[in-house]
Image (tube, rainbow, N blue to C red):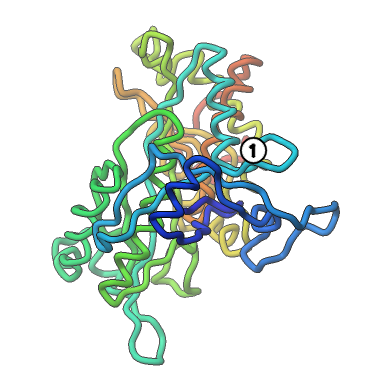
Amino acid sequence: MMLPDMHGVARAKMVTAGHFLEVIDSGHSWGIPLIMADLWQNVPSDREVPTGNATIWPDLSTFARLPWAPHVAHVICDVALPGGGVATARDVLRRVLESAATSGFEPLFGNELEFYVYEPIGDGPKLPVVGMSEWFTDQALAKRQPFLDDLFAFLPLLGVPVYEIFNEHGAGQLEINLSPSTGVSALDWVFIAKAAIKEVARLHGLHATFMPVPRNDTETPPSGYHLHQTLLGDDGVNLFVPKHGDAALSEVGLSYVAGQLEHAPALTGLVAQTVTAYKRYRPGTWAPMRAGWGIDNRTAMVRALPRGVGTHIENRLGSSCANPYLLAAAEVAAGLDGVARRLDPGQPCAGNVADDQRYP
């Protein structure tokens, strides 16, 4: 029984199958401080935090048997507080999506995450499974074929629609892309995939990490979490498609972009919530340095991709360790605020956005 903490880490309890049948009807206890603790088990001290228990309830739509451990299944849970209400990042996203639906919008998400895989060598340092010079090569993929084969086999069995996996430009860096989808389940897949990748790596004697900057050297560029997004109307039509052929985005799309640029400082605090994550924002890393946008421009925080009926944006602000539910909720809420206020993002940057003084 697992649920995401504020950092998106899969916190869990293991129960017997017999007890789980009772949990379906009556829930299971969960310490309230666990909901608010950070990665170092620190609990906020600026307000009173209850020390008792909440109740976790399994979402049976996420129930799946683990392919590598057939006698074990997992299920994502939500938390109900004693005084009423729920308290998970998953529910934050649910409320944002409900607000979007009230306005006639349904966000469509495409998830793209980078991570590192290392090979422990005895008691010494962990070494990258491939070198930086092997980026985007068939040889790099072949070196870890058994590990990749298991990911391609196991993740779909957990309901995760894998689109592709390839090695990125960092030494030992890989990227996984998931098929586009809507709803909370699109981010459930990210939560499940991250946990599964780490477990499957361990079965192969490897160590997988979504820490954005696991090593301080030139062969370890940071790992990001790029969230592709568009808004669908009530009839399922892509609302980012422009009415005029010479435009990159519709008016709705432009205002959505403007909302995300407007709220970039606050978004950064949610999608790069640790010092290590914030270290990603530096020159020469393909991470955004300014709150700007561009058309098919990877130096921009928001990259517009005009592709006919598939027109959408890619927000490149997120770090690989970000809580997927909070990342999606915050970016959608920011975009919808821009739509509601009809904000204008200004002209797109055609060059390196880091050098464009128009952007903060």
Q: Picture coordinates of residue 23 (x, y %)?
A: 50, 47
Left or right: where 199 falls relative to 265: left
Left or right: where 282 falls relative to 235: right
| The C terminus: image quadrant | top right
Q: Picture coordinates of residue 34 (x, y %)?
A: 65, 58
Amino acid at pointer 1: Val
Q: Residue furthest bottom?
A: 123
- In the image, residue 240 sits, relative to residue 165, either above or below, namely above
Q: Residue at x 26, y 45 (%)?
A: 162
**Is residue 36 visible in the rendered structure shown here?**
yes
- In the image, residue 118 sits, relative to residue 45, either above or below, namely below
Q: How many marks?
A: 1
Describe the element under mark 1 as helix, strand or loop.
loop
Q: Nearer the viewer, residue 50 or 170?
A: 50
Q: Picture coordinates of residue 44 (x, y %)?
A: 77, 57
**Is residue 169 visible in the rendered structure shown here?**
no
Left or right: where 331 falls relative to 263: left
Which residue is disc 1 drawn over?
Answer: 86
- In the image, residue 181 sits, relative to residue 23, either above or below, namely above
Q: Residue at x 65, y 68 (%)?
A: 40
Q: Residue at x 50, y 45 (%)?
A: 77
Q: Picture coordinates of residue 84 (x, y %)?
A: 71, 35
* Quarter where residue 137 is shown: bottom left
Q: Nearer the viewer, residue 202 or 276?
A: 202
**Disc 1 crowd, CA 10 A, few/some/many (<14, 14-19, 20+):** some
* Quarter where residue 133 is shown: bottom left
Q: Residue at x 75, y 38 (%)?
A: 83
